[in-house]
Amino acid sequence: MEILINLGYLAAAVLFIFGIKGMTTPKTAVRGNQMSAIGMLVAVIAALLDHNVVRFEYIIIGLLVGGAIGAFIAKKVAMTDMPEMVASLNGIGGGASLLVAAANYLESQKLAEMGQFTASYDWSLAVILSILIGAVTLTGSFVAVGKLKGKIGDSNKVKLFKWIVKLCFLILISGAAYFAIVDPLNSDMLVAGLIIVCLILGVSLVMPIGGADMPVVVSLLNSYSGLAGAAAGFVLGNNGLIITGSLVGASGIILTTIMCKAMNRSLTNVLFGGSMAATAGVSKSENDAFYEGKVKFSSADELAMLLDGAQKVVFVPGYGLAVAQAQHATRELANMLEAKGCDVKYAIHPVAGRMPGHMNVLLAEAEVPYDQLVEMDIINPEFAQTDVAIVLGANDVVNPAASKDPASPIFGMPILDVHNAKTVVVVKRGLSPGFAGIPNELFIRDNSLMVSGDAKKVLQETITALKDL
Amino acid sequence: MEMFIMSLTIFVLAIFVGVEVINKVPPTLHTPLMSGTNAISGIVVVGAILSSGGSEHTTVLSTVLGVAAIILATINIVAGFMVTDRMLNMFKKK
């Protein structure tokens, strides 16, 4: 039976790998996700067959309650809230790993009383690690959710939090050493204390990070939620958990790296550098002086006329588009232009939206075909042949200062070269700075026009004007 | 200790497999990738089930913690897979 169960875990891990492999193209992705889900079912059945499972009632209650809650939120969540959703689920996963580690610790005590278990150093280490990663993922994720929702603002107490982080690590290391060396099996209070320290650590690690950097944090916590599972696997000596946890860990690490590259910042800088806007931002009067009299304002009617004669149009969506819920209006306008024989594409910056790939999901929801969504490196050379580039609620990712001005705080960040297009139309509610807190030279260039207003409203007016032409 | 080294070996090799496979996922699908892998990290439900099965070495407290862990892990799994499916179906249409 033992062999069968372990083969079940192996089969689950293989199904997960095939499942992720399916995600390499949009066509096979749905099947891939289903394979992963089947893998999970196989793993759960294998666990139920374990000789340690003699009563099923609690397990079934747990599965039903969790499943119902899960299904409810999956159906309810809006696509704009995906970053918060994924961050919350990371936290819940971390919490589950933490609870498993704690439960397993208690069971090991009982086993030791029965003379069937002796604690080893590597077991102690695994217990501490799974508590650490699980707890940090749990509280860190919920702070990230608060920041994504804008309920927790950027903190100016960066130094205080750094100090708390150091203190937590100090307590953790000394506590862990005592735990491992002196008395691993009779340290209930110590373990409870360490759990609390790790929970505080999770809060203090994420609090000083700027709201604009949350895509990096969410990716990183995604990685942690996997590593927490792997750590629980070490505690239980379960290879299925270890393999699966490390797959998820790897995925989070890769996405974190991609996000950091797209913002031209090192991970250490994101995690410990404080908020970018707090250090580099300009004051409101400086911002106003920068734009004073230099911005050419335009209207939806003019935009419609411009688009009427255009052969190639590129939309550049930013998070502002999602806030204005303008995805469908964008799609409608794009349809009209395509019907006129115009070539329409969407330029997607890697950090457009609030998590990796978020903008793609939002546009896919509005039924934009995914082959029109073009990545930065591929679309950039095309801007020179573009008649009209329409920037919708994006700012820092189209700031030419990033490639030209070494003094700019965002210098070196890869940007979409919209300024190379014949005409750039910026649809924006006002001239306030973006996340980086700096003014944007693009808005005062000769080939730029500004249509101020809510993206959805402006686009709807443009559609009406275009129909009347 | 031998057990630990073997687990560590598996851990490191699996990370390499993960990096290889995931590097091929296009940026378009990064959000579903995250929610999908997130669902997979709910595998910790296996550990939770073992703690809630009422075998002789469990205590009241460990069972309570285990059942709570099952609930959390199942939320993670079900919500993760379902929301990923919702997103991927949007991409599939064309």
Image (tube, rainbow, N blue to C red):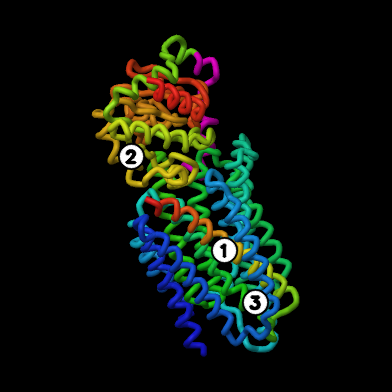
x then y, percent, for residue A459: 46, 28
Find out whether residue A269 is within the magenta segment. yes
- Depth check: give the residue in front, A63 or B52: A63
A436 shown above or below A269: above
The residue identified by callout 1 is B78
Q: How many marks?
A: 3
Q: Can you see residue A191? A: yes
If you read the primary sequence from the N terminus, does the residue marked by circle 1 or circle 3 appear first? 3
In the structure shown, which secondary structural element does the residue marked by tag 1 occupy? helix
| Residue B54 image position (x, y, % from top left) | 69, 82
Residue type at mark 3: give it: Ser
Would you say B60 lies left or right of A409 here?
A: right
- Is A284 inside the magenta-drawn segment? yes
The boundaries of the magenta stretch are: A268-288
Closer to the eye: label 1 or 2: 1
| Residue at the image point whose x is 57% and y is 74% from the top | B46
The residue that label 3 is drawn on is: B51
Residue at image location 45% in from the left, 24% down from the top: A464
Identify the residue under disc 2: A376
* Tag 1: amino acid: Val
Q: Name the secondary structure under disc 2.
A: helix
Q: CA distance from mark 3 to mark 2?
A: 48 Å
Image quadrant in which you'd find residue A405: top left
- The structure residue drawn at horizontal position 64% and vertical position 75%, both measured from the top left corner, is A104
